Image (cartoon, rainbow, N blue to C red):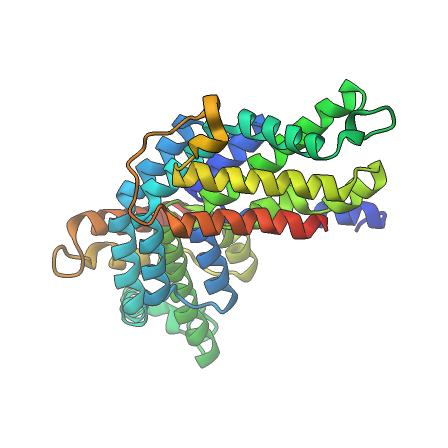
Amino acid sequence: MKSVVTTVIAAADAAGRFPSTSDLESVQGSVQRSSARLEAAEKLGNNIDVVARDSYDACIKKYPYLNNAGEAHSTDTFKAKCARDIKHYMRLIQYCLVVGGTGPLDEWGIAGGREVYRALGLPTAPYVEALSFARNRGCAPRDMSPQALTEYNALLDYAINSLS
Amino acid sequence: MFSNDAQCRLLFTKESLMLDAFSRAVVSADASTSCIGSNKISELREYLAAANRRLDAVNAIASNASCMVSDAIAGIICENQGLIQAGGNCYPNRRMAACLRDGEIILRYVTYALLAGDASVLDDRCLNGLKETYAALGVPSTSAVRAVQIMKAQATAHIQDSPSEALAGAKLRKMGTTVAEDRCASLVAEASSYFDRVISALS
């Protein structure tokens, strides 16, 4: 699992040297920005059910055809799976906020995602819509501090770009 | 699909495991597909609050590494002169050099673990199979363990930045970082636990 610290260590190890001053400085740089990230992670973690549910509702509202027989949102099982997927993305975004990098999204959300959706015949546009809804609803300082919101939105953008 | 077992293993080899305090939290939360809870996040905030001290500690060890290693190896030889006599494991120079190199490697991985706040990199990249390797090469584990014990004491002194004048003499060297009131007791304990991990892996 990649994070700033593990990346630094992997590079130092590949060169067979002790952590250098610049290694330590890059860790410190990430430490300095981390309070905003952890704030966003904590707020998202505490409200993830609401955030995921609202995003899910938004995408089904925008793409009502999904409710038609045979479509991806036509049965209770399908509905539950859709809601679960949205929450899954939000959870990965929380993980990314904690590690301070896109490692969790890359490894568990994006790698192979396109192939899976294609194999299952799922459209990606509704996912984009759900994440865009989450992207646009956040409001500082109502929901979290401006810096925290910036970090949160950047990760949502990253996930949206990977799907579009 | 796979023509033989070896090929299959090659493709599915577990990726090397390296975690830090943050990715450890992520991996364990993912195991139960749950978010990272508030209590875990406050633990991570503690790591961050003490991060400058941790970086100073890593810097203290890294800056003194070659001295620590050569002193530790000199120490085991002082205590056991047989090592540098014909047939000893630090004789001739070629084997002495290998010994110094191994001391540095172990210290380096302990330093990585201290930086990460997690022992996985030490376990996975250094200790995994080390005992078996040493057994195969005929390295005496008592001497190796003793060298690690010496490095542990040195690391403690460097993290606390409290080298004793009586012991260090002319070699006395202070890092001169701001000294915390508790002499970084929790970091000393953490670093010691990584050295203990090496010792128990070798014993």
For the point 70% across and 35% down, the residue is: B79
Viewer-nearest residue: B167 or B147: B167
Res. A148 in view? yes
Q: Position of residue A148 (x, y in %)?
A: 22, 51
Q: Tell me: residue B162, above or below residue B16.
A: above
For the point 32% across and 51% down, the residue is: A156
Count of numbered marks:
0
Q: Position of residue B155 (x, y in %)?
A: 49, 39
Quarter of the rendering containing residue A21: top left
**Residue that protrudes farthest toward the front in the picture:** B166
Q: Position of residue B180 (x, y in %)?
A: 30, 44
**Residue that protrudes farthest toward the left in the picture:** A141
**Residue that protrudes farthest toward the top in the picture:** B93
Q: Tell me: residue B8, above or below residue B41.
A: above
Viewer-nearest residue: A75 or B120: B120
**Residue that protrudes farthest toward the bottom in the picture:** A76
Q: Left or right: A140 with respect to A102?
A: left
Viewer-nearest residue: A97 or B80: B80
For the point 51% across and 60% down, the residue is: A121
Res. A6 in view? no
Q: Tell me: residue A94, above or below residue A58.
A: above
Q: Left or right: B59 with respect to B48?
A: right
Q: Position of residue A61 (x, y in %)?
A: 27, 68
Quarter of the rendering containing residue A119: bottom right
